[in-house]
Image (spheres, rainbow, N blue to C red):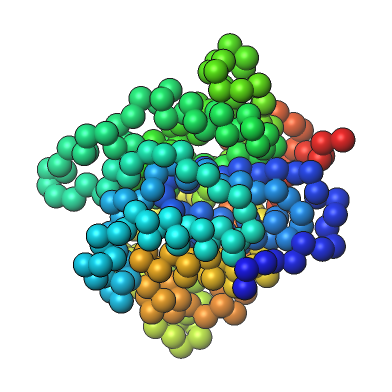
Amino acid sequence: MSQVPRTGHASRAGLRLMHVHAHPDDESSKGAASTAMYVAQGVDVHVATCTGGERGSILNPKMDRPDILENITEIRRQEMERARDILGIRQDWLGFVDSGWPEGDPKPPLPEGCFGLVDVEVGAEPLVRLIREFKPHVLTTYDENGGYPHPDHIMCHKISVEAFHAAGDPERYPEAGEPWQPLKLYYSHGHSRPKAVALHEAMLAHGLESPWAERLETWPENPEWDARVTTKVHCSDYFGVRDQALLAHATQIDPDGWFFSIPREIQVETWPTEDFELVVSHVDTELPEDDLFAGITPDA
Ligand SMILES: [Zn+2]
């Protein structure tokens, strides 16, 4: 499957959505079904990928081979190209180097020159340029904790917020193109505890083994964070496209891993939405929403 249907929602043509992600595969593991849905409706979707994922561990045992590890940068580029085509998006690299996941106690310092250590203004500059070129109405990124605390995800948050506020200001980044102010900024709330609990309980109710039994024990409740969700986008018709995009990242995704052990029907009936938090809006909208473009009309 390389194309999703683009018919039936001509009214959405002219709308533009930009997602900022830390690594190749994040666009497929966070918000990919709503991405595919918006593309099918005629929205132009652009993904900006901060790093090349050079230090990502190989998470698929079948791909954990020396020849793959040696060529990981090129392989992850090819995987991203496949995912891009499956989702029907445009994609650009911001060109920073993956920080890797710091392991150990105490954690080792981040490697020199990595994305997690860049000055926020240096990191935001290429993103401001992309925003001014692509002119998105809506920008999404991670929350201030990165969604999970990978140094690249936290830096992705910082440069996205900086670029969202600066892109429309002619005094900021004057070398990076004509000002363009995106209208809404969202944080992705893809991996929430309430969603994990709901899927866990649904699996048990169907007499299946839940992949969350252990994870949930060490996953503290965070009702304040959960309550920040403002926008639930119904996109379960596109879970299949999401899965194909995920599988395109073959070094990062194990097709026999826990994620794919949850039957699609259970996901659809239990949690048919992808969830977001509206953080800034320059248009009138009423919360809660079910659409990232609520309050926005396409350019004349
Ligand atoms: Zn990532």
Q: Is residue 234 above or below residue 262?
A: above
Location of the N terminus by quadrant is bottom right
The residue closer to the viewer here, 138 or 25, is: 25
- Residue farthest left in this picture: 105
Number of marks: 0
Seen from this angle, which residue lies furthest bottom? 207
Residue 267 in which image quadrant: bottom right
Residue 243 percent across, percent down from the top left: 53, 70
User: At which x and y percent is residue 196?
Assistant: 45, 65
Which residue is located at x 54 percent, y 70 percent?
244
Side (left or right) of 22 relative to 88: left
What is the x, y in percent for residue 241? Answer: 60, 69
As drawn, 49 above or below 195: above
Q: In the shown orientation, is residue 55 left or right of residue 148?
A: left
Vertically, is 20 above or below 35? above
- Name the residue rendered at 60%, 39% in the picture: 139
Viewport quadrant of the C terminus: top right
| Visible residue check, residue 161 | no
Inspect this view and state whether residue 246 appears.
yes
Residue drawn where x is 70% and y is 37% of the image? 137
Residue 155: percent from the left, percent from the top? 39, 36
User: Which is nearer the eye, 267 or 205?
Assistant: 267
Residue at the (32%, 45%) spot, across then down: 98
Q: Is residue 235 left or right of residue 22?
A: right
Image quarter of residue 296: top right
Q: Is residue 270 above or below residue 281?
A: below
